[in-house]
Amino acid sequence: MANSPLKIEYLDKLRLPKKRRRFSETTPASLSTIPTEWRELLVQWVRLGGNSRWDTLIKKAGLAQKSTAENLLAWLLNNGWAEVDEERKYGDWWPYRVTLCEIKDLRSQLGLPDVDEVVAQWQSLRANLQMKADNNTPLLVALSALDAMPTSRAITRAMLVQSLLHWAKDGRAGTYRDFSLFARAATKEISQAEWDWLDAHFELAEFNIARHTPLLLVSANIILRTSLGDLHLCAMPDFAALTPATVKSIHVIEGQVSTWYLVENRTSFERVARNRQTNEGVIWLPGYPPSWWKEAVKLIINLAPAPAKIACDPDPAGIAIALSAFALWREAGNRAVAWKMGVEELENLNNKKQLSEFDQQQLSGLLKQSLPIELKNLAEYMQKHQKKGEQEGYL
């Protein structure tokens, strides 16, 4: 870098110094006149924190903008916005570290939020969510994941979580686009990465959020008498898909069902539905039962009561899902038992998976409850062997 009438401070005491700092004592100039490409690059530099190695800033600019980066640095240095640490190499001085000055004012002129305000916003959001996280394992796990993120990203995702909780509190139901409209005032404002993150940490069906209109999948030799006409499920060789509105219109069910089978995994459900006995009924249990599903199944079992056999994955989530389905049958005064959820099924699986941290937390909570003996044995086996499985391996 060419010499300029800047202040110089040598950083070592050698007779021939190898490191120095150059800076200006001038009041920082306005950024209003700098070229657009400089401003865009400067925004990227500021987001790195304001104290970076020159190599890092050059890489951020890219080879095509190397000249732009050098010109921007010279301008920042000469106009009071930067201090540059240099080292002597090959008989000349070369920058190795850049410290941006008056960073708060710099962020303001660039239209970037104040760091202290951002941190305060995150702390407030996190504290609010923490208050709601008691006995809510998914929310606790999500908070842990947010803590590991850059603050700005943590804020945007924490706000989505907050919207999710408000959505549930209001008793809302709808599609992904409905939730996006609720959370961000536009139907396509949630990115795929954000949806993936929400899906990974929360069972969105529990919040009555679905990609499309939800469907109750059921197979049985029954006739549904509805306000709009009759539906002959007995004429369907595999299963029927009923919308919540269709189920609500049912007022009579004709035909006898000896046992209702509830199967969690979709592939396993279809196999069981196609191979059921004439007097048996099969219902798909789509993970943690959302409220629309519970309401639909309550109506079905009230009009066609029968004991239930409930089959979920042999894993901690499967036990929790089965328990929530058991409750529906108890409320209706009917008996329900676990089916194909024993130690033997898990033990004989060829492919087992290691329990995750979330599985461990969930399992610990389940074992504190009063579980049916078969599910208790399964939970204890999982805890001892640290293994879980998926029901499509045997059902």
Image (spheres, rainbow, N blue to C red):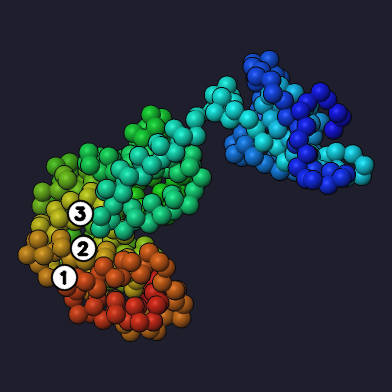
Q: Earlier in the sequence, mark 1 or mark 3?
A: 3
Identified at 56% across, 24% down, the residue is: 105
**Residue corresponding to mark 2:** 325
Q: Is residue 123 above or below residue 75?
A: below
Q: Residues within 10 Å of mark 3 (few under 14, many from 20)?
A: some
- Choose the circle earlier in sequence order: 1 or 2: 2
Question: Can you give x and y, in whole percent of width and height, for residue 60 in the image?
Answer: 70, 39
Task: Name the residue tied to disc 3.
Answer: 294
Q: CA distance from mark 1 to mark 3?
A: 15 Å
Q: Please state the horizontal and vertical placement of residue 168, each as a whole percent of the image.
A: 25, 43
> Mark 2: which secondary structure?
helix
* Residue 312 in view of the camera: no
Task: Name the residue type under label 1.
Answer: Ala
* Residue drawn at (41%, 49%) of the image: 198
| Secondary element type, mark 1 | strand
Q: Considering only order in the chain, which callout, 3 or 2, is on the residue closer to the N terminus?
A: 3
* Mark 2: amino acid: Ala
